[in-house]
Image (spheres, rainbow, N blue to C red):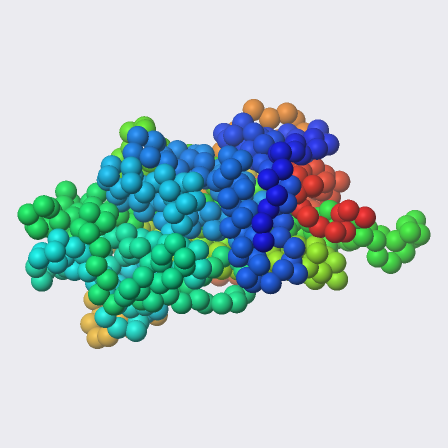
Amino acid sequence: MTLTHETPSPIAEEQLTVLGARLRAALDGPFAAERAVGRATFPADGMHLDPAVGMEDAREWTLARLIELERRGFGHSGVPDGANAVSDPLTAVTTFEMLAHGDLSVTIKSGVQFGLFGGAVTNLGTEWHHRTFLPGITDLTLLGAFAMTELGHGSDVQHLETTLTYVRETDEIEIHSPTPSARKAYLGNAARHGTMAAVFGQLVVDGEQHGIHVVLVPIRDDHGVDLPGVTTGDHGHKGGLLGVDNGTLQFDRVRVPRRMLLDRYGGVTDEGVYTSPISSTSKRFFTMLGTLVRGRVCIGGGAGITARRALSIAVRHGLRRRQFPAAGRPEGVLLLDYLTHQRRLLPRVAEAYAYGFAQNELVELLVKVQGPADHTEADQRELETRAAGLKAQTTWFANATVQEAREACGGFGYMSENRLTQLRGDVDIFATFEGDNTVLMQLVAKALLTGVKESWSALDRSGVVQATTRMIGEAMVERTAANVIVERVADGARRRPEETTLVDRGWHALMFEERARHSLDSLARRMRAASKSGGDQFEAFNRLGGHVQFAARAHVQRQVLGAFITALEQDLDAQTREVLERLCSLYALASIHEDRAWFVEHHRMSLGRSKALGDQIDALCRELRPHALPLVEGLGVPEAWLGTAFLED
């Protein structure tokens, strides 16, 4: 299938309510100008694939659409196209977010091509690699796969089986898949369109292994035929993202010139000697993966946009669809006038705003770390931890929200023409790629516990073994802006929390702070006991899996609340501030309500207050109901872009 190359047609100017426009500007925050330009210039004509199209046609349509977007300036934006170009993280992320307003196969194929394959060349290669390959990558004449995952190794990248062996006699790198489990799998662009792959494997030089490195390997000729020694495979039909050609790669002693090794952080000299500016294999590994953190930032942002699309459809449907006549309402009651319907959707709208504000802070941190400004190792650690946690939480939120939106639309939602079933299938995998969410939350908890052994050792040596675990917890948590602002707001409610109202921001902050701090303190205490218990250490730590997940989630939610509170400090008019204040309260109370058993069990909240939470959430939903349309306008998805048939009636 092909796309016509018509002249770009401007999208009809949106007719937003005054409040909707102001909420959108507040949610766009520091990037309001960039996002406004994106909406005004995005080539939205033809942005949705016909849901009845089959897999092969979907693949060709997706590639054609990506080529069209590149031609019209929305392809590799923010990605360098040559040796002297500079990567622009802000433009790259905001472009990815804009693409997520349309077909998600296009969004992900763009991410594979420019973010992963192109990102590997940009971040791990040198000037020669940039000059040689980036022009073709960015103009789509060189399509590539990002060959990291293996059938036997997904999250455990450090122990990939693929070998990259330096052959001194011919000055080449030999790529080999030594076992069936070393086959590269689930790779976008591998099944059909890719002609090269960035292959991750263990670099071996003169029999010595130097850890994970990446080499560029041609995999097909210009006619789509596998090159000698390369075996490609096609995963075929999937649960979503049908336009992305996911496939497998296997290598039988394939050789490429030594210079195809992406050697910014380690490579082989002309004399055949391995060299690296980073002596530690482990540190080199994490440095290399750290350069690819932008992918997680993009995936989290894209998932957030998908949730906003689903909510925009469901809320607008609730404002149009009527059910059952009632007194004074002979034509029937609007769905969104039912409190039960409001409870389904409006807390999720509040959460969408919360994750949007948190995404803004994460993008600001990404720009600081990957932009021209100075940054520290602490900034890099915070970026990696935040990106992992927010990616996990936002993608889980998106999956649950799209499903709720589908159900809230009844039969309308189940019709493919209204997009929700396609969104549900396409966003599902977001919880898995760029890091499995459960594993990412383990990484968050591990980052929070960094230094705990040193803290305990210092306490033991000084004889202050009885010191509180709270002191240890404070030593382990980075003093980030989000943590500080939540602590500051919580201070006002700390002395007498039960005397505050349920909508008191200080009480919300205190509950989020207590949940995060106590869960981390108790996790540290249990981990120390497990380490001293002897016996099966794996099983001892394995029992803590649920606690690890809870502590990580509590930490991320505290950061999200902190981002919302910070956003409220913007220069806002009275009505916009009032609505955002209520949204913030709704987000906070919904989170506290979800964990109300924990708060009661840990004596952070009385049983009476726990029972009152539901009524207060109901009250907030009723107060926000008159603003339902401006609320979804504020989410930033133009109605004309939703592509739903029922809105065209």
- Looking at this view, is 294 or 191 the one in front? 191
Q: Nearer the viewer, residue 375 or 269?
A: 269
Residue 332 position, x and y percent, is 88, 53
Quarter of image, res 522: bottom left
Q: Nearer the viewer, residue 515 or 430?
A: 430
Is 630 or 103 nearer to us in this picture? 103
Q: Residue at x 76, y 47 (%)?
A: 647
- From what the image shows, is residue 251 above or below residue 583? below
148 in relation to 499, above or below: below
Q: Quadrant of residue 240?
A: bottom right
- Residue 514 can be seen, yes or no: no
Q: How many marks?
A: 0
Question: Is residue 526 placed above or below 613 in the rendered structure?
Answer: below
User: Taking 404 as reference, is 429 left or right?
Assistant: left
Q: Position of residue 15 (x, y in %)?
A: 73, 32
Q: Residue at x 61, y 43 (%)?
A: 4
Position of 80 with respect to 74 (left or right) is: left
User: Which residue is at the far front?
Assistant: 223
- Residue at the (16%, 60%) spot, across then down: 165
Residue at figure coordinates x 55%, y 62% from the top left: 56
Left or right: 271 in relation to 519: left
Q: Is residue 330 visible?
A: yes
Which percent across, then down, holds residue 86? Answer: 34, 31
Q: Position of residue 321 (x, y in %)?
A: 80, 52
